[in-house]
Amino acid sequence: MGIYLDYSATTPTRAEVREFMAELMVHHWGNPSSIHSWGTRSALVVERARLQVGSLIGAEAEEIVFTGGGTAANHLAIFGVTRKYKTPRHVIISAVEHSAVAAPVAWLEEEGWAVTRLKVDRYGRVQPQDLQEAIREDTVLVSVIYAHNEVGTIQPIKELGHICRSCGVIFHTDAVQAIGRLPIDVRELPVDLLSLSAHKFYGPQGVGALYIRGGVELQPYLFGGGQERGLYSGTQAVAAIGGMGLAAQLLQGEMATEIKRLFNLQQKLKLALSSIEELILTGSPEERLPHHLSYCHRRMGGREIVRKLDQLGIAISAGSACSSGKILPSPTLLAMGFSLQEALGGFRITLGKYTTPTDIDQLVAAMPQIL
Ligand SMILES: Cc1ncc(COP(=O)(O)O)c(C=O)c1O
């Protein structure tokens, strides 16, 4: 079967969720907007899921808007805020955002918006002081990733949020990688908008949500039937949303123990890999997602490492991308001050629900072979 250690790319939909979704597709295929009983039965599924997803992060059900995934949630946050203004203003993001935030913001920049990209330190962390200094009179949105997909670093979200709040600026965080791996409670967190994606926590792909704090007004960027309070038009994907809700509920019950288990596996792997001299740990050693380890190799390309491990039946991810046949260095590692060679050598190992200590042993045994 092989060993899957790429849980930050996606997680398998868990059995309970698969079975529930199949049942929903058989019995709850009505359009939730229809007023007959087929419709109202489906609408109930969607509303229960809204409660379940809200409860996972301490939000009210009405603060959750379902979207077509994490990318769509980020777009709703970014365009939802910026479309309210007739003339371009100023937006702040970090230099290490996921492309689902970086790309729409680059598009805004082309449209004439001013954009500040906050620099990060060697560990990929933003300094709250830098945010304080970057906020201008015309700043309307700050968006900083909660925990990084490539290097696992957790940002000082609470401090950043307090700065935004004291300046009256809307604060969005892409928490797609953090959900289920860190306890998150929006009642204690000064964030206005927070993105989630079901396929990162054992739910289905193609469904996500944006948490919108009560009182925060957004403009839609999708128009049509006016579903999701007019903020995300299009018939809701009832089975996928129901599946996301159940995944959120199951996660909530097991998260505390699972985080501890993942952390122990992570520490075991980190210790074993620390004897390989050519590997440099990237990202923060302490402020880090519990399921995540990332390295760069001083001489070997990250993609080569991924391919060689794949031949041995082990799946991990590389930090570098390939475009038009050319291998590109990781922009995140470059922003963190790594050399071009090192930024080509990045790779990440991410653990999850079905990872066992034996999987870790097998990866550790394979590493010297492939390096
Ligand atoms: C940090 C982060 N944001 C956004 C996304 C995009 O989410 P989705 O695949 O649900 O569109 C991902 C997916 O890898 C991610 O890691």
Image: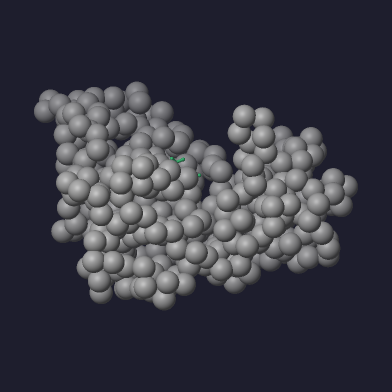
Place of residue 145 in the rendered image (x, y in percent of width and height, measured from the top left): 44, 57
Q: Is residue 32 above or below residue 362?
A: above
In which image quadrant can residue 49 be found? Answer: top left
Count up the numbered dots. Answer: 0
The quadrant of the rendering that contains the N terminus is top right
267 sits to left or right of 187: right
Asked whether residue 74 is in view, the answer is no
- Looking at the image, the residue that sits furthest to the front is 112
Foreground: 213 or 133?
Answer: 133
Place of residue 165 in the rendered image (x, y in percent of width and height, measured from the top left): 26, 70
In which image quadrant can residue 168 be found? Answer: bottom left
Residue at image location 25% in from the left, 74% down from the top: 166
Display coloring: one colour
Q: Is residue 169 above or below residue 32?
A: below
9 sits to left or right of 210: right
Foreground: 97 or 341?
Answer: 341
Residue at image location 25% in from the left, 54% down from the top: 89
Place of residue 324 in the rendered image (x, y in percent of width and height, measured from the top left): 62, 29
Foreground: 206 or 327?
Answer: 327
- Looking at the image, the residue that sits furthest to the left is 35
214 sits to left or right of 92: left
Asked whether residue 33 is in view, the answer is yes
Q: Is residue 237 above or below residue 147?
A: above
Residue at image location 31% in from the left, 50% down from the top: 113
In which image quadrant can residue 142 be found? Answer: bottom left
Residue at image location 55% in from the left, 64% down from the top: 124
- Looking at the image, the residue that sits furthest to the right is 369
